[in-house]
Image (tube, rainbow, N blue to C red):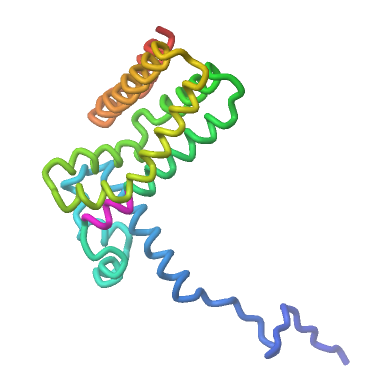
Amino acid sequence: MKKTVKTGTATASGTARARRPTQAERSQATRERVIAAAIALLHKEGYSGATTLAIRREADVSMGALQHQFPTKAELMAAVQERLAGDRFAQFERASRSATTPLERIDRMLDVAGALIGTPLFAASMEIQLARRADKELDEAVTRVLEPFKEGFRALMRDVVVGFDRETALKVAQLQLLGASMIRGLTIDVVTGGEPAAARAAFALWRDI
């Protein structure tokens, strides 16, 4: 007589069960879906097209779940900008810390800057920045979340110019401003139909100069 062999992972109750996500984990997952949906819509439709209704549909969450995470659109967009600024800062910080000389540090940070041109994440961030001009609530919310990153970027730039004379340090600061303006302008060109390869080539030319 054959015996039946049962397979599976045993538990204390004798039944294999997958651990159910906690309320906090479900809430975080909802938050991540909403932020990802907002970024996608900001890139595809611009700020005006990234309405709370459109974001809710893109994220496939209820309006109640969205408003529980972000009571207002301004708070949602500030959270998106905080995420995007944090990601950028981490990239620049890694690039800066991995260099051993000032010129190498500048070179590696330029690598990061050039890689941002035309990307959905950078385009989404620009949409929020531009919308701040006409939305006081958004401006206040974004100002609050970006303040720590501003100081972080200032610290990185101070590290870049350590050992330079005053005149050279000023030129580096001016070039940093020009570089930031360059990637913003080229990103606008790409998201409005320009060729990404042409934008990258233009940045490479400016970098060589």
Q: Considering the image in quadrants, where does the C terminus appear? A: top left
One can see residue 62 in this view: yes
Tell me if 139 is positioned left or right of 207 in this view.
Answer: left
Residue at 54% from the left image edge and 35% from the top image edge: 94
Tell me if 173 is positioned left or right of 160 in this view.
Answer: left
Image position of 203 with respect to 153: above or below: above
The span shown in magenta is 74-80
* Between 27 and 50, the one nearer to me in the picture: 27
Residue at 48% from the left image edge and 36% from the top image edge: 91
Residue at 66% from the left image edge and 81% from the top image edge: 16
Q: Considering the image in quadrants, where does the N terminus appear? A: bottom right
* Between 81 and 42, the one nearer to me in the picture: 81
Q: Report x, y in % for residue 195.
A: 32, 22
Image position of 31 with respect to 201: above or below: below
Q: Is residue 4 magenta?
A: no
Q: Report x, y in % for residue 49.
A: 18, 48
- The dominant secondary structure in magenta is helix
Q: How many marks?
A: 0
Q: Residue furthest left?
A: 134
Q: Report x, y in % for residue 139.
A: 20, 47
Residue at 45% from the left image edge and 13% from the top image edge: 165
